[in-house]
């Protein structure tokens, strides 16, 4: 892979997650602390990310795979998203915020599988190279989290104005990316391909089916973390919560750099199980910690993010690309996004909001019970994978699909 291509792919990941991180972990604080929305309302708005992920396979499996170059689709989505973010920053009612966030997320969330598939199509050794490109997404998330925390805009709509400006920059940058023509150009579009049903052929592999079921279940407690950790830390008196949460992405950078070594020495099952155990431990630490003597537990929970995210999510993306037929790789990534960021996180968003309200009394929120339920759920999913996932292989894909002329 040419150095110029690697640089552009890395910058693409950096900017895409720079935009995402500007609002994703702090929107819950803005909704509950500033707009005074209930936990159920905040969870519903956070759930727009999941609804959008259910729609994103349309862009991945039809638009980018058949009709338009991927980099141009990315540019258009970010340009429209910038306009919508500007209006989000000025909305104050539940109906307006919900509608605008849904429209914005429909634009943004297709960019996640699109950037993954674009990068994978230009790599010559995905198992070794993808983690080194993908790590810049994490670096982007760290940088924007530190900036949001430094500017103290976690409770302010300014976070959306910042994201809007970044979206404009990302839209322009996408036009400089390597040309990535539609992989399935000229093929007949059908309802099966549009909704990603073609990827169901992969479910014949029992272990991959187990992985998909676990991924959906995993995203339920996962959403508890992303929806309300920032609000939780602010509520219990942790200063500069957004900045401290960026330590999680710092640990992710370290783990991302180690992933090629881990892939060579451990099987897919072992890596996935380790990630699930880390999630269970993380939630347990959040339930037991405090902003005083127990602050170390919060730090430990945050620093576990590298294992939590990389071991399950990144491994799952590469495992999916490895298992998918060459002509279905983009569709398979879209299908995985539909099930995880879509179905799983939608259920998690609704349940997390309900849980926050259920654990709220006149005396305040019972965060201990909130996080303890997440911990129990994560350990239960670990047991499911440990028992049902039979494949012992490693990440062995040596070469991604070539870009068609």
Image (cartoon, rainbow, N blue to C red):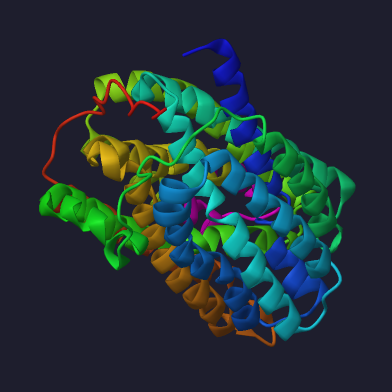
Whether residue 272 is visible here, answered yes or no, is no
Residue plotted at (67% across, 35% down) = 175
Q: Identify whether 354 is placed above or below 343.
A: below
Indicate the position of residue 120 as horizontal and vertical percent values: 42, 31
Residue plotted at (60% across, 69% down) = 46
Front-lying residue, 227 or 141: 141
Q: Identify whether 304 is placed above or below 199.
A: above
Front-lying residue, 256 or 7: 7
Give left or right: position of 38 versus 265. right
Residue plotted at (67% across, 77% down) = 98
Q: Quadrant of residue 57?
A: bottom left
Indicate the position of residue 45 as horizontal and vertical percent values: 63, 74
Examine the structure image and report whether residue 90 is included in the region drawn in magenta: no
Front-lying residue, 218 or 10: 10
Give left or right: position of 171 versus 192. right
Indicate the position of residue 345 as horizontal and vertical percent values: 46, 65
Indicate the position of residue 65 as horizontal and vertical percent values: 41, 47
Residue plotted at (70% across, 47% down) = 19
Q: Identify whether 114 is placed above or below 10.
A: below
The stretch of residues the image draws in magenta is 282-300
Of the 4 image quadrants, the one containing the C terminus is top left
């Amino acid at each position: 892979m040419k150095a110029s291509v690697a640089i552009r792919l890395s910058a693409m990941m950096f900017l895409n997650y720079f935009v995402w991180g500007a609002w994703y972990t702090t929107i819950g604080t803005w909704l509950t602390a500033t707009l005074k929305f209930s936990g159920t309302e905040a969870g519903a708005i956070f759930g727009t990310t999941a609804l959008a992920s259910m729609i994103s396979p349309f862009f991945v499996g039809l638009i980018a795979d058949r009709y338009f170059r991927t980099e141009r689709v990315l540019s258009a989505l970010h340009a429209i998203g910038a306009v919508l973010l500007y209006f989000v920053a000025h909305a104050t009612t539940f109906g307006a915020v919900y509608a605008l966030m849904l429209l914005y997320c429909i634009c943004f969330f297709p960019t996640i599988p699109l950037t993954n598939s674009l990068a994978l199509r230009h790599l010559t050794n995905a198992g070794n190279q993808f983690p080194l490109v993908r790590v810049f997404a994490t670096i982007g998330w760290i940088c924007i989290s530190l900036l949001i925390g430094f500017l103290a805009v976690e409770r302010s709509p300014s976070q959306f104005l910042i994201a809007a400006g970044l979206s404009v920059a990302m839209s322009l940058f996408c036009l400089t990316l390597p040309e990535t023509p539609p992989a399935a150009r000229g093929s007949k579009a059908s309802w099966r391909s549009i909704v990603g049903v073609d990827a169901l052929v992969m479910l014949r592999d029992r272990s991959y089916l187990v992985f998909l079921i676990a991924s959906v279940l995993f995203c339920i407690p996962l959403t508890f973390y992303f929806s309300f950790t920032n609000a939780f830390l602010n509520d219990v008196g942790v200063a500069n919560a957004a900045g401290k949460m960026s330590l999680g992405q710092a640990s992710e950078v370290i783990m991302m750099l180690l992933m090629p070594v881990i892939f060579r020495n451990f099987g897919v099952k072992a890596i996935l199980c380790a990630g699930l155990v880390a999630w269970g431990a993380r939630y347990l630490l959040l339930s037991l910690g405090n902003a005083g003597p127990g602050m170390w537990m919060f730090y430990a929970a945050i620093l576990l993010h590298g294992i939590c995210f990389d071991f399950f999510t990144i491994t799952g993306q590469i495992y999916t690309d490895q298992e998918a037929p060459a002509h279905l790789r983009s569709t398979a990534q879209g299908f995985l996004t539909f099930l995880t960021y879509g179905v799983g996180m939608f259920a998690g968003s609704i349940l997390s909001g309900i849980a926050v309200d259920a654990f709220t009394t006149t005396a305040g929120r019972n965060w201990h019970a909130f996080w303890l339920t997440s911990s129990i759920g994560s350990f239960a999913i670990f047991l499911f994978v440990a028992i049902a996932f039979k494949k012992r292989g490693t990440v062995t894909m040596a070469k991604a699909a070539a870009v068609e002329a």
